[in-house]
Structures are given as structure tokens and as C-alpha cells.
Image: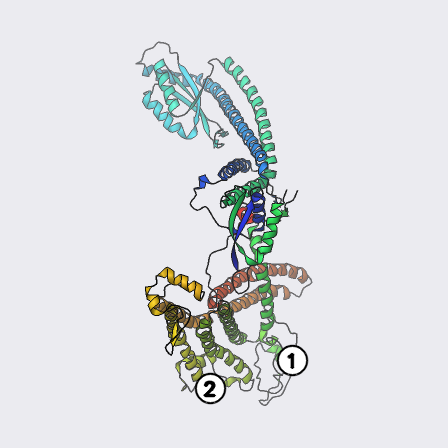
Amino acid sequence: MGELFRSEEMTLAQLFLQSEAAYCCVSELGELGMVQFRDLNPDVNVFQRKFVNEVRRCEEMDRKLRFVEKEIRKANIPTVDTGENPEVPFPRDMIDLEATFEKLENELKEINTNQEALKKNFLELTELKHILRRTQQFFDEMEDPNLLEESSALMEASEGGRGAPLRLGFVAGVISRERIPTFERMLWRVCRGNVFLRKAEIEDPLEDPTTGDQVHKSVFIIFFQGDQLKNRVKKICEGFRASLYPCPETPQERKEMLAGVNSRIDDLQMVLNQTEDHRQRVLQAASKTMRVWFIKVRKMKAIYHTLNLCNIDVTQKCLIAEVWCPVSDLDSIQFALRRGTVKKLIQSRLLAQKSDNEMFNMVFAGRYIILLMGMFSVYTGIIYNDCFSKSLNMFGSGWSVRPMFGPKGANWSFETLDSNAALQLDPAIPGVFNGPYPLGIDPIWNIATNKLTFLNSFKMKMSVILGVIHMIFGVSLSLFNHMYFKKPLNIFLGFIPEIVFMSSLFGYLVLLIFYKWTAYDVYNSKDAPSLLIHFINMCLFNYNDPTNKPLYRGQMGIQILLVLIALACVPCMLVVKTMVLRRQHLWKKHLGTQKLGGVRVGNGPTEDEAGIMDHDQLSHHSDEGDEHTVEEPFNFGDVAVHQAIHTIEYCLGCISNTASYLRLWALSLAHAQLSEVLWGMVMRLGLSSRSGGGFFGLSIIFSAFATLTVAILLVMEGLSAFLHALRLHWVEFQNKFYSGQGFKFVPFSFESILEGRFDE
């Protein structure tokens, strides 16, 4: 779908679907993904449409599946994704799906309820076990004479010093560890110090059966005297959500009770394990088909939602739908409708092998862009003769460093070359320069000290050349738009002034670059003028600069003419086009009626007739006569402002956009320097070794070099180049011809519906 120069041609089609086949037809269209349905019931409430009950049933099934999915995730069970795209269930299959989901939901809820009750019982028995153990330790400690005397003295002091024998009561329980300090202070204040509290921490955390969290708790025992203090203590324990458990008074009873509790805990643990195993089996079985169930339910819901957009014929036997679809896909859509009409043993089954890796999907979607970027990288590498900061000596160097005798008496030998770190080659000396390199950059520049100066100048000019060609191509594409929409005014007062303006200034600059490359050789290269100064003086009409000599004869006259032509293009776009548009509007206002020599020419009404006709009559007359409808109101001020903005933006944009292409030069410079640093600081260490073990060291160093090269040069620099290239295409290139108007085409497609759910 889609063409090179503009969006796909769309058409509004009307579908007549049999009631029995409507479901299958919409299913086929959803698999095809080429039509966008229009809502033919905009005034009908959502809850009053024909298939609202089916939509609700699908939503209920979706809710049950989300509950099961939540339980699967809670159990840390992975969902199996085979990449299968299941076929849409038939309407009669909805009952079976509902029964399956209802049974699965009820079974899981029952398991969860039983498991929660078992865990609660297990928690109570565990707490009781710790209470019985700790209580016995408390009573053993109380048999210590010192502690017994202390507690007795405390109780006698609280009773006013009476010497009657005391009979103490006690309660035992479990409380959260963080509540102990507050709990202890509350007991002291409410009971006025007439209670004796002993506590001990439970080492292992206990699981809360409701939330599943691990909670740290402590065992406590409170001694008191009298029923009044007993009631107060119990109310305080209830307020702090402490769990109280019955605890026998004699050691023998506590020992027997502890044995019974341990036996019940073992039995309960076995039942819990069996329950958890059963729950795991149910969830694992559901996880294998969870994605397929989701797809089926979502497809069914999408179909019924789409059917609610259709109109129902008065005979209740036909559904009428209106769709937007591409003209080129009408045959495919009709074939899908025929296939849906006869569909009962037949529906396409597509296997969508997709990866869940977001990075892989992004790279796979942009595989063609990456391929083109790689091809252009190879091209620029050949032009710059740069491969990982090393030059390829394919054709031999154009410079000769053999021992020679020149006019200046130079006498170089191999010893001279070995003993000097830097030597200067004069191209004017015969025998030194043998001619230009056949393709790209001479490899000898890779070891030259002025390498950066030479390459910077060359890469900057290449960036300007590529940028101007790219922008002229973008302006040329606008011609196809004007021809397609049959707007000759935009061609003569839009495209032609724009292409002439850019060619007169920046196209001429490109020609100067090529002329300078061909006009100057090694003998007169020192006298070559600066093109940047030339271009600035050209725009300022400054030709009295003695430091910048002209490039060719008659340069001043040609440049003055080109600047005047470029300046003349500005009022053509700014003023002339606006006035012509106004003139066309005034002419259309008279409906094509003109008078030549007193004779009325045209099929429109006269001016007097047009004055007494209302808007509807004018529109009707125009439709019947010259097949032109009444256009939108013409506002001269808005048109003038719009044209002024467009002209200023284009003229200034030609300058700023050309400068923006210099980012190609900056990226190339950064890439070359990074590759040179990696070679000089990493790879050269392995190549410098002359020992026998240098091979093994070189292998390790090459691995590091390859890793850094892939990570920095290919991945990081590649991503940076991609972003800059994307910006150049979107801003500098597409603004010359592209105008995104209209409405986005959103076809009814199962793939797009399911992507939002399963491609996360």
C-alpha cells in the first residue's frame, strides 16, 4: 500500500452482507486488514445496538481470562507463546468457550479459598506451637528464686503489701514485632503496673495467608491477678490485633498439647503441598493455551464491535456497511468477502513467528534502511579510502618517494626516509607527483601530517554537493505533485521560481567546487582562491577584494546576473502568485461569464442574474453548467500571509538547510578520529610485539579491538548517523514537497488489535 510520491488513492465503498455470513465476512476483512469501517449509527447509544449482548459476553470472557492470567503471573509461570494465529471461533463456539472459562475460574477460586483457609489454620497452629514452647521456657524461668521473689514483690506492692498467698492468672498470644513497644506501654498505663509481661521473638517469619507477605512476630505471656485485670488485658490485646491462644497451666498438659499440634502441622503441611501442586498443574495447563484464548476472544469482540457499526436492512436479512479502502486492493477485498460468504471447512491459518525482543523487532523493521546505510557507508569508505582508519593501496600512490634529484638539489635515499619522521614532498618537482589517484583518496594521505587539513576541506565540499543535490531532488518531486493535482499556477509561480532560486545560488556553488577541482593542479594549487569568500562576495556584490582572485573570465557579470535572477524569483513567489490567486477568485466569482465585444460568453448566469440568486441556486447552477462547485471563501489577507511565510521559509531555509548538511562532514570527521584512536591505542599494541608469544597477545588484543569497533563505530556511530540522516530527510528534504494532509487510514485489522496486547 502506498506509492512513492503520494499516499494511496482511497475510495468509499458500500458492503451488503448477509446476516448469516456477516460474521465470517468481517472476520476475513479483519485478517486482511485493508478496510476502515464507518459508523453508520452515530446517534444510537452503545447499549442499544444489535450485538451489544455478544460484546458483553466477550468482555466477560476477557475478564475471566485476565483473572487466570493474574494467577499465572502470581505463580511465576511463563506463558507459552508459539506464535500461532488461531482462527476466529464460530458464533456457536462462544458457548463452549464460556463454559470452559467459567469452569476454570470457579476451580481457581475454590482452590484459592481452600488454600487460604488451610494457610490460616497452618498459621494458627504454628503460632500455637511457638507459644507452647516459649511458655514452657517462661515458666521454667519463673522457677528461678530471684525472678519469683521479684514478681511476688511486685504483685504484693500493687496489693498494698498484704502477705496473703497470690494466685496469678495469665494469657499467652502472638503479636507483630513492631507493635511490642506500644503494646507494652499501653499495658503499663491501663493496668497501672499491676501486670507482668514476658516476651520472646519468633526467629522465622510467618506468612500472612491473606496477602502472602512475610511477617515477623513475637510470643508474649502476661501474668495478672483478678478478673478485672484479665478483661483489661484481653481488650488491649484485641485492640492491638494480637492473637490469643489457650495454654494449659501444667507442664504435662502443655507437652501433650505440643505433640498434638506438631502432628496436625505435619498433616496440614502435606495437604497444603498437595493443594499447591494441584493449583500449579491447573495454571500450567492454562498457560499453554492462554495466548490462544486471548486472541480468540479479542477477535470475536472486535468482530461484534464492528458489526455494531453497520446498518440493518428493513428485512432483517442484510447488514449494510460503509468502508474506506485502497482502490488497488478492491479485488483482494472482494475475494475476501466471497471467501467469507462460503466459509464453513475453510479459514486461513497463519503462523506469525515473532520475537519478543523489542530491539530485534526494531532492527528487523528497519532492515532495508540499515542495508542502504551500509551500502552508502561502503561507498563513502571507497571515496574517502578509509577502512577502520587504514587506507587501501589498490592502485598504488600517485606520489613518488624514490631517491631523486630535483631543481632544488634534493637528494633522498632510503636512509633519509628511515631517519626522518617528517619529510615534505613538493609536487612541483618533476617525478614527485605522477598524477591523481584513479578512485577516491590517495593512500599516502593517511601518513601525511597535513592529512586532517586536506580531508576536512574535501569532506566539507562533498557534504555541500550531496546536500544541494538532495534538496534540488526534493524540489523536483514537488513538480509531480503539481502535475498530479493539475495546478499549473503552482508550477509556473511555485516550482520554477524555487528551482531557479536554488540553482542560481547553491547550484552555482556546486559548479564552482567542481570547476576548482579541475582548473587547478599541483603547479598552481597555491593560487586557488577561497570559494567561501567568493560566495559571500557574490551575494554582497563585492568584487574589489584583492586577496581573492577570480576563478575565470567574466565571473563578475555571470554572478551578478545569477544573484539578480535569484532575487527576481522572490517577488514571483511572494507577490505575483498571491495576486494571480486573487484574480482567479474574482474570475470564478462570476462563474466563468465574460463579455467579449459586448457579447456574453460562457454558460454561467449574467451579473444581474447572479445578484438575485441565492447560494443554493448558484451551487446548483454551477454543478449543472460547468461541473464546478462553489469553493471555500477566499480571504486575501490569509492567502498573502501564508504565501509570505512560505516564501520566507523557503529562501531562508535554502541557506540554513545547506549549512545543516555540514553535519555529514562532522560525522565523518568524528568517525575517522574514533577509528584512528582505536587503531593507534589498541591494535598497534599487538602489532608492535616482535616476540614469539606476540601471536597470542595479538589474538587477545584483536578481540578487544573488534569488540570496541562493533560497539562504538558500528552500533553507537551507526545510530548517530541514522538519527542525523533521518533529520536531514524529514526537515531538509521532505519540506520541499511533502504536506501530510487528510485523515489517517486505520483499517480494521486483527493484527493491529492484538499487537497492543501481546507485543509488550
Q: Earlier in the sequence, mark 1 or mark 2?
A: 1
Disc 2 marks which residue? 555
Q: Looking at the image, which is closer to me, 172 or 19?
A: 19
Residue 312 appearing in the image: yes
Please give the label number shown on residue 414: 1
Callout 1–callout 2 Cβ contact below 8 Å: no
Displayed quadrant of residue 621: bottom left
Please report the residue visible at 55 percent of the width from the left and 22 percent of the height from the top.
265
x and y percentages locating residue 595 in the rendered image: 38, 75
Q: Is residue 224 above or below residue 200?
A: above
> Which amino acid, mark 1?
Phe
x and y percentages locating residue 296 in the rendered image: 57, 41
Displayed quadrant of residue 582: bottom left
Residue 164 appears left or right of 506: left
Does dot 1 land on a helix, a strand or a loop? helix
Camera-near label (1 vs 2) is 2
Residue 197 appears left or right of 101: left
Local packing at callout 1 (Cα closer than 10 Å; few below 14, some 14-19, many 20+) is few
x and y percentages locating residue 143 in the rendered image: 45, 16
Q: Looking at the image, which is closer to me, 378 or 509?
A: 509
* Alpha carbons under labels 1 and 2: distance apart: 48 Å
Q: Looking at the image, which is closer to me, 140 or 659?
A: 659
